[in-house]
Each structure stands twice: as C-alpha cells, then as structure tokens.
Amino acid sequence: MPAENDPFKEAQAYNYSIYLMVGMPYLLLGIVGFKVYRGLKQKALAEQESAGLVPAGGQGERSCSDPSPVEGSLPAP
C-alpha cells in the first residue's frame, strides 16, 4: 500500500477498470464472430473444391497480385 493516497490516481484506476469491463464483451464477441466467419468461409471453399468448381488449394479466388484491368480504363482497340 503506498504511503500517500492520491484521489486522482485512484479515480483514474477506476476509470480504466470500467473501460476494461465495458470493452471486454465487445472484444470477445468480435473474436468469436471472426472465427465463425472464417470457419464458414473455409467450409464454403471446401464444398466448392469438392464440387469441382474451384481448383484444389483455394487458388480459384483472385489475389492482389493477379493482373486485372483497371476500373474505368478504355478497352484495347
């Protein structure tokens, strides 16, 4: 226990604990939601692979490195 009792530090500590208690459910909900989203996305990709719609390994989706036309560009003559 510190020798001096600073009311400002005590109030600041209470504020931090309240922020933590209020924010924790949102953080946990976000993590669970992300896990569910990722699981559903992987399940859909696995179903597409088994149906033969996408090559094995998940390479059917475009990535940022794939060359693609720029939106709004004019077609080649």
Image: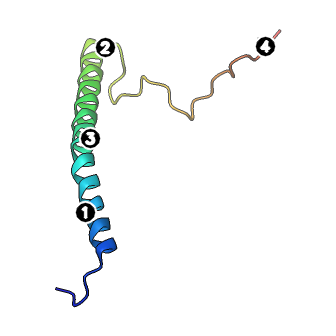
Checking the image for residue 25, the label placed there is: none
Q: Quadrant of residue 9?
A: bottom left
- In whole angstroms, how far apart are the C-alphas of marks 4 and 3? 46 Å
Q: Earlier in the sequence, mark 1 or mark 3?
A: 1
| Residue to which mark 4 is pinned | 74
| The one of 8 and 47 positioned closer to us in this rendering | 8
Looking at the rendered structure, the secondary structure element under dot 2 is: loop
| Residue ranking furthest to the top | 77
In which quadrant is the N terminus drawn? Answer: bottom left
- In whole angstroms, how far apart are the C-alphas of marks 2 and 4? 34 Å
- In whole angstroms, how far apart are the C-alphas of marks 1 and 3? 19 Å
| Residue to which mark 3 is pinned | 26
- In whole angstroms, how far apart are the C-alphas of marks 4 and 1? 60 Å
| The one of 7 and 61 positioned closer to us in this rendering | 7
Mark 2 touches mark 4? (CB < 8 Å): no
Residue at left 33%, top 30%?
A: 57
Residue type at mark 4 is: Leu
Within 10 Å of disc 4 (Cα), the crowding (few <14, some 14-19, many 20+) is few
| Residue to which mark 2 is pinned | 52
Residue 46, above or below 34:
above
Q: Is residue 76 left or right of residue 51?
A: right
| The one of 61 and 5 positioned closer to us in this rendering | 5
| Residue ranking furthest to the bottom | 3
Q: Earlier in the sequence, mark 4 or mark 1?
A: 1
Q: Earlier in the sequence, mark 4 or mark 3?
A: 3
Q: Earlier in the sequence, mark 2 or mark 3?
A: 3
Looking at the rendered structure, the secondary structure element under dot 3 is: helix
Residue type at mark 3 is: Tyr
Looking at the rendered structure, the secondary structure element under dot 1 is: helix
Checking the image for residue 14, the label placed there is: 1
Nearer to us: label 2 or label 4:
4
